[in-house]
Image (cartoon, grey):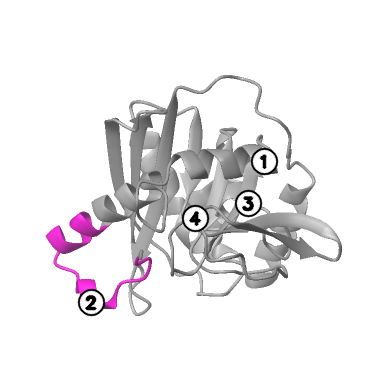
Amino acid sequence: MDPSGYEHLSPAEAIAYQDELRQKIQIRELKTPFKTIAGADISFNLDSELLYAGIVVFKYPDMQVIATSTAMSHTSFPYISGLLAFREIPALFNAWNNLYVKPDLLVLDGQGIAHERRLGIATHFGLLTNVPTIGSAKSRLYGRYEEPADEIFAESPMYDKGELIGIALRSKLHCKPIYISPGHNINMQQSVDVIKNCIRGYRIPEPTRQAHILVNKIRVKNGEDNTKQLGLFD
């Protein structure tokens, strides 16, 4: 399905599409060496139908920026937990298509399989583009876990009905953990290892941190009130 048609789906139709996509998820070892990685983020106001998407591509593992892309998109799809990908992916897909250097691996600010139907935005976008993806979220959407120790890179597994769906990772002392889950075409351990390698002194990994900075520059240039934004990093 073309993402441009997402806004015409009902919530029930969106859930049915997630169930269809779920059958195609591949959580497996990424055996192809990757030399580039990108971060993607979305920002918008709850009272606006305009969304801003940004992607920043880096050399890996030295994290030198080599390309960026932004896009804007309108959506009328409602803001519903578990279905946010249907609001956000059309703008992100436009930014992806505008990107002249496609990365070997993409980190998205959101969930991978740590989702009720295993279809967080990272998994959904990976299935659409066939690029390996990782979800790195600032808040938990789904799954139970024990709070990790207050030590850098302390981990705690996240489970749903006995299934490992993510890792709560302490990326910075005295801060809430981040929530890592594979999206598509990569496994759990690789996802966590990559995110650890992308931490540069902040709570969130450098790819999505830089994407957040980029997308909010576009918001400001477009005259939006930056105090009402969603997608703030910390």
CA–CA distance in space, label 4 to label 2? 30 Å
Q: Mark 3 — residue?
A: 181
- The amino acid type of the residue labelled 4 equals Ile
Q: Percent from the top left, x then y, of residue 41?
A: 39, 53
The numbered mark at residue 189 is 1
Q: Percent from the top left, x then y, of residue 26?
A: 74, 38
The numbered mark at residue 227 is 2
Observer-side mark, 4 or 2, equals: 4
Magenta span of residues: 216-232
Q: Mark 4 — residue?
A: 152
Residue at the image point whose x is 70% and y is 30% from the top: 29
Circle nearer the N terminus (4, 2): 4
Taking depth in this image into account, of 4 and 121 the one nearest to the observer is: 121
Relative vertical location of residue 26 with respect to residue 45 in this rendering, above or below: above
Q: Percent from the top left, x then y, of residue 71?
A: 31, 48
Taking depth in this image into account, of 76 and 96 the one nearest to the observer is: 96
